[in-house]
Image (tube, rainbow, N blue to C red):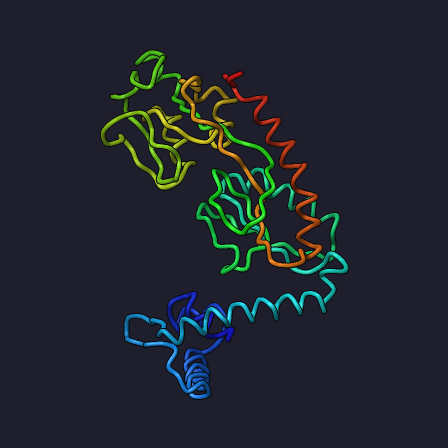
């Protein structure tokens, strides 16, 4: 079951084999043996892709449930429900995770020597169940789901530009004032910027967008924590505060699957107040913070 689920999740035998450290020939033989024992074809294999048959789709759904139960039983047997120990997998956005989550994780490791942490930094919302994530930091509105969310704060979305650009074009008083300014955008789920047309520069990370804005390429719109260092240094100025969208909520998120392992509960209790304190400090120091 584990091998089949791994192949389905990764989309190919070779990718699953690399992830599991299992030869492709072994994977193929194990899957064939499983199909022979069930008397049903689970996968349709071509040279380009694998697809589940109807029987395979139903079997994989059941297999995931069974494997979750087995994993929970193993955790309980290993003592994860009676004492905090084991491996804890946490995910967070790259910049926020490096600046604000990593220090919390380091302090946590110092207090809980029997817990190991894998910190996955990604700006993609990783699926907690499919990727076996224990805890996630999410910035933004949460969709309705079976996940359990603990709010730790919020974050402004700010529009900013370099002092040189503002000196050349003047300080904008309304979004329409920057409609024809050069813009620096990044491919994120942030609200659309107030300028029209094609941006002067489009980049793939917020860090690059901030760097370009500091160099005077254009005006940019980012979450405040992404521009905080540049704003403190006077390299960027925040404008149009009165037109900011509602601050984005920040949550710690975990799956609601039965009894919560103590390692996860301990991290939640440890991290939540520390992240709240860090976000409160960040809000207080924000230049031009609206009342």
In the displayed structure, does residue 95 sit left or right of residue 211?
right
State the image coordinates of residue 145 (x, y, percent, origin top left). 50, 49
| Viewer-side residue, 61 vs 183 | 61
State the image coordinates of residue 151 (x, y, percent, origin top left). 59, 38
* Residue at the spot 45% in from the left edge and 74% down from the top edge: 59
* Residue at the spot 45% in from the left edge and 28% down from the top edge: 157
Residue 138 sits above or below residue 23 on the image: above
State the image coordinates of residue 252 (x, y, percent, origin top left). 58, 44
| Viewer-side residue, 96 vs 214 | 96
Residue 257 sits above or below residue 190 on the image: below
In the displayed structure, does residue 150 sit left or right of residue 47?
right
State the image coordinates of residue 101 (x, y, percent, origin top left). 59, 42
Residue 288 sits above or below residue 260 on the image: above
When asked about the image quadrant of residue 65, the answer is bottom right
* Residue at the spot 57% in from the left edge and 21% down from the top edge: 285
When asked about the image quadrant of residue 33, the answer is bottom left
Return the residue found at the far left: 197
């Amino acid at each position: 079951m584990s091998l089949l689920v791994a192949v389905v999740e990764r989309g190919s035998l070779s990718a699953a084999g690399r992830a599991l450290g299992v030869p492709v020939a072994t994977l193929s033989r194990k899957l064939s043996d499983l199909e022979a024992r069930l008397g049903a074809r689970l996968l349709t294999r071509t040279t380009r892709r694998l697809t589940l048959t109807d029987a395979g789709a139903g079997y994989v759904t059941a297999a995931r449930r069974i494997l979750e139960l087995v994993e929970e039983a193993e955790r309980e047997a290993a003592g994860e429900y009676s004492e905090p120990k084991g491996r804890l997998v946490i995910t967070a956005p790259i910049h926020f995770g490096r600046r604000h989550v990593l220090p919390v994780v380091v302090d946590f490791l110092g207090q809980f020597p029997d817990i190991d942490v894998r910190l996955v930094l990604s700006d993609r919302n990783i699926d907690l169940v499919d990727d076996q994530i224990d805890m996630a930091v999410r910035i933004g509105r949460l969709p309705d789901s079976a996940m359990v969310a603990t709010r730790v704060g919020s974050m402004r979305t700010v529009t900013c530009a370099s002092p040189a650009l503002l000196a050349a074009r003047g300080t904008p008083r309304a979004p329409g004032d920057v409609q024809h300014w050069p813009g620096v955008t990044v491919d994120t789920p942030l609200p659309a910027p107030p300028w029209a047309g094609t941006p002067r520069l489009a980049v793939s990370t917020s860090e690059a967008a901030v760097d370009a804005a500091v160099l005077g390429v254009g005006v940019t719109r980012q979450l405040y924590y992404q521009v905080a260092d540049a704003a403190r240094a006077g390299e960027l100025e925040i404008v149009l505060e009165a037109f900011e969208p509602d601050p984005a909520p920040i949550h710690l998120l975990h799956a609601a699957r039965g009894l919560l392992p103590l390692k996860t509960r301990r991290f939640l209790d440890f991290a939540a107040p520390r992240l709240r304190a860090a976000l409160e400090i960040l809000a207080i120091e924000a230049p031009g913070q609206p009342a």
